Image: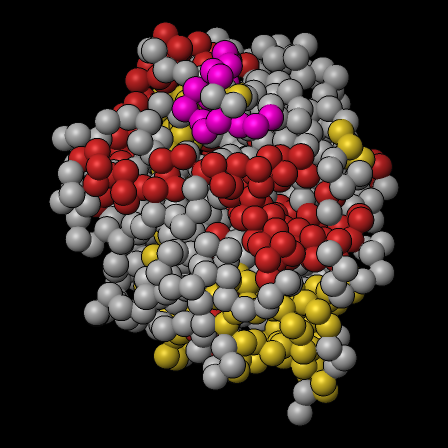
Amino acid sequence: MSAAVDAFIPADEHSPSGTDCGLVIFIDRQLASEWGGGAKMYRSGPYHKGKPEQGYQLALTPRQFFQTGIAEANAWSRKTHGKEFDRLAPADQVAALKAMEEGKAAFAGVPSRMFFNMLLSMAMDGFFADPAYGGNRNAASWKMLGFPGLPATYADIFEEYRNKRYVAPPRSMADFS
Amino acid sequence: MATRLKDVDAVMVGMGWTGAIMARELTKAGLSVVGIERGPDRVPGENFILPAIRDELRYVQRLELMQDNSTDTITFRNAAPEQALPIRRFGAFLPGEGVGGSGLHWGALHWRFLPADFRIRSHLRERYGAKAIPDDMTIEDWPVSYDELEPYYDKFDKLCGASGQAGNLKGKSIAGGNPFEGPRSNPYPNKPIMSAAASLMYADAARSLGYHPFPAPVAITSAPYTNAEGVALGECQYCGYCNRMACEANAKASANTTVLPKLRDEPKFELRTRAFVTKLIYDKHGKKVTGVIYTDMRTGEEYEQPANIVVLSSFVFGNTQAMLLAGIGEPYDRATGKGVVGKNYCYQFEAGAAAFFEDKEWNPYMGSAGVGVCIDDFNGENFDHSGLGFFGGGYIAGGPAAAPPIAGRNVPHGTPRWGAEWKQATVKWYNRVARFNTQGSVYANRENFMDLDPTYKDAFGRPLLRLTYNGTENDHKMSRYLLAKLEGVIKAMNPTHYEMHPRPRNFTVVPYQSTHNTGGTMMGANPKTSAVNRYLQAWDAHNLFVMGASVFPQQHGYNPTGTVGALAYWAANAITSQYLKSPGHLVHA
């Protein structure tokens, strides 16, 4: 997982790496959350594959889907590259992620593209969410964007900054709690 | 066996905009009213507070305020021969749950339909010929006119403290407003929200092409305002957290901020939350609904609430499902075109664009739904459709509502979705993007409808509602036409780069598009072709009144809530001024 989130968010002059921003722990917590456990999700059968237009149709919760996807990604990596994903050279990891993104990685069960999209969207959620969630440590992504966070009350300066960059150190929910 | 409770004068099934407005008007008339809401209570000042409300992950991504699909959902297919499957988590549209309903997390765009929209079938026949409307286009005239509804639009404006610029005051044209709008009896209660930089550029470009730009009208107070109920509303803070959120400044109007503060103090009103209505008790011979059955979700106990008047004020899907389950009104039959309940399901045909400006530097996270600028030159019958091969249209908006960091980042098409290059592009463009939207109409088609699913059930064992919907050729042509007009304006803005986002051929249940679902219990002048009459009274149950966008005969090129609010006041007036004096059918077919 570290390898994947570091490929998504590599360290450079704009931010630390995904791992250093806390994305691995963020994803773990999200999967352990009610959302990861399938809260507010209709889960009754019968199950059919359906058309892509009909959206997600699996019986698995996000947590179960993700666990399955990780196992299948490693099995596929062993089969095609001789070792598990986290032990591949960085360039091979990027190539493997691209194969999943394009749906070219033949997973045994869950579609590789669907797994990739879930992994990517969780990483982006965490990187850009409030730092209180643990995936945007020190508001790294907010600094990168120039997003000031809270309290977000701009009525008095909206006109003044209409065509001019507003700069303020980002503040998290945690800074107000 | 359900425990039978004490009779009340009226019961509301759902406590969003319409349930709250109706409950308020009926208590003013002296009636005892119970408001039943499946979700939790949501109270301004307790639930919508800093810092917790500024949480994009919780509200925008994890959908805190939306319907719990583990209890119920709908099934979906593109066309009748296909197998419908459950939408396991809502995506394309997001009905709300809890007090305030979808009117709590809405974007608060506040529109009226055009006078011609209300008589669209007649209008098209008069203008383009008796055979102009294709056989499968099942659009209908509304059984109420713009002029009749105008005082109620006005009333809803004053409840919300709406902000905007009038373009037509009692027939007099006002510069800077929408010249195509129907005559208003009063200006907006508040001046427009300030426009964003990109919106002002859009306005200039539109004007240079001969179009008529004006600030987006919103149910958001641009200044402190005391509304018609005597409730003090706040002032927009341009925080950028409108959509999918509640407003901590009490500026974005919801039932919670505008009506409920008074209603909660009303001794004749009782609110029951976490109470799920599973059944309307229908007396077919008496043509009456005698009450409702609901489950108290906190205890699992089942209750019967008898009432003299039953108001169906849930979302489009819940309203339609409740009538189908109770057997009130003839279910629509696609094969024969007969029947009414489930008929004329429509959606909003939105499409958009993004333009990138290398030499600009904006603050895209600041904003409100009202910072956009709109043109209405290509809506409804504001333009000539001769030779175009479609009917309908929509307003075209320029300028971002707001761009929060998770959901509001655009990079040019073709940029990788991750890695160093993606990061570089994100940093470069986040502050330099303008976004655009076309709010296209959906003109009803006989193939698009709702009925009960034969396979899937909800948590109570009731059949789910089944939606059969796809975009029609008419609506796709309309949408492409609007996008072409929009593209002309964008070109005139001279961006570094731009891209148009046309709709895919097939409707899909993800990603998010619009929560403007309409139809299913349509209003009309004839019981053979509509489920409710002009006062939203069910033809087959005189004490059942059905609220909300489920009564729309079709969806026009505007956000629906302005009309939903006006219709709630219109129906409430019919009940208090006519029905209470002589309970029975208000319209005789």
Residue B82: x and y in percent read: 26, 68
Residue at x 61%, y 51% (from the top left corner): B573
On the rendered image, what quadrant is the C terminus of chain A found in?
top right
**Residues rendered magenta in the picture:** B172-186
Q: Nearer the viewer, residue B310 or B276?
A: B310
Q: Nearer the viewer, residue B228 or B320?
A: B228
Residue B382: x and y in percent read: 33, 27
Seen in the picture, residue A121 relative to B368 is either above or below; the reply is below
Residue B236: x and y in percent read: 70, 28
Residue at x 74%, y 35% (from the top left corner): B227
User: In the image, is B356 to the left or to the right of A42?
Assistant: left
**Residue most extreme to the front:** B582
Residue B300: x and y in percent read: 71, 81
Q: Nearer the viewer, residue B35 or B454?
A: B35
Magenta region, mostly helix, strand or loop?
loop
Residue at x 54%, y 40% (from the top left corner): B562
Whether the magenta-drawn stretch holds residue B173 is answered as yes
